[in-house]
Image (cartoon, coloured by chain):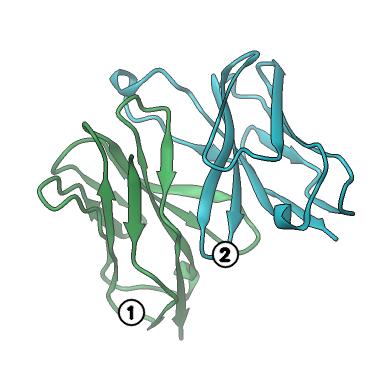
Amino acid sequence: GDSVTQMEGPVTLSEEAFLTINCTYTATGYPSLFWYVQYPGEGLQLLLKATKADDKGSNKGFEATYRKETTSFHLEKGSVQVSDSAVYFCALSSNTGNQFYFGTGTSLTVIP
Amino acid sequence: DAGITQSPRHKVTETGTPVTLRCHQTENHRYMYWYRQDPGHGLRLIHYSYGVKDTDKGEVSDGYSVSRSKTEDFLLTLESATSSQTSVYFCAISLGGGLSSGANVLTFGAGSRLTVL
């Protein structure tokens, strides 16, 4: 069945460091891919999405490219800030668009 | 979280008691979901609904039931709570309609923290 595997955490970075969080997926057909972010004590919020191969999703300085050949959707940011400290979830929606599958989450802490 | 309200936000109960969590939306979205979030497991789907009185099981549905009598409300019931059901529960909604309508996006509520003693 469909599934998402993402990089184990926790990840600790200094402010202005480069961030990569790896995400790979298994799916039939052509899923849509997402990154969600969860700040402490809150629900998940959509960070970015991509709906087809080679699409790049971007938001708030974060980017991820839908790579069908490597079944990956890695999250990157060139210069992290303390305010980026959160848990990041990679997710996909199934071929029908109505079933969603999540990775286990990666906790990021950015220190000044 | 715009358009989604979960209640209660926090609840402590004892083993064997029934518990109902409520999710209310004002977005008129067709699909509603209940997830639980646990360390090391991420989010796991409990049940979902694709319309009034139309529901289906997710990957961790044992011990849970749901009901949807109105578009805006989706109830999650633990008939007899157990300590293994201590978790944070999230409701989510999406428009539905398949990929032809563009990527469906899940919008989440703020969560309900349940502790079963």
User: Element under label 1?
Assistant: loop
Residue at the image point whose x is 43% and y is 60% from the top = A88
- Whole-percent x and y of residue B43? 52, 50
Whether marks 2 and 1 lie on the same chain: no
Q: Position of residue A104 (x, y in %)?
A: 45, 59
Left or right placement of residue A42 versus residue A32 in this view: right
- The relative height of residue A1 versus residue B28 in the rendered view (above or below) is below
Query: Which shade is chain B?
Result: cyan
Q: Quadrant of residue B76?
A: top right
The residue labelled by disc 2 is: B39
Toward the viewer: B12 or B29? Answer: B12
Foreground: B99 or B102?
Answer: B99
Q: Secondary structure at mark 2?
A: loop
Q: Residue at x 71, y 56 (%)?
A: B84
The quadrant of the rendering that contains the C terminus of chain B is: bottom right
- Left or right placement of residue A2 versus residue B38 in this view: left
Q: Amino acid at mark 1?
A: Glu
The quarter of the picture where the N terminus of chain B appears is: top right
- Say which residue appears at 63% left-offset and 45% top-offset: B90
Q: What is the C-alpha distance between the residues marked 2 and 1?
A: 28 Å
Task: Tell me the shade of chain A.
Answer: green
- Reading the image, the residue beneath label 1 is A16
* Residue B115 visible in the snapshot: yes
| Amino acid of disc 2 | Pro
Query: Residue B46, relative to residue A75: is it above or below?
Result: above
Q: Chain of mark 2?
A: B
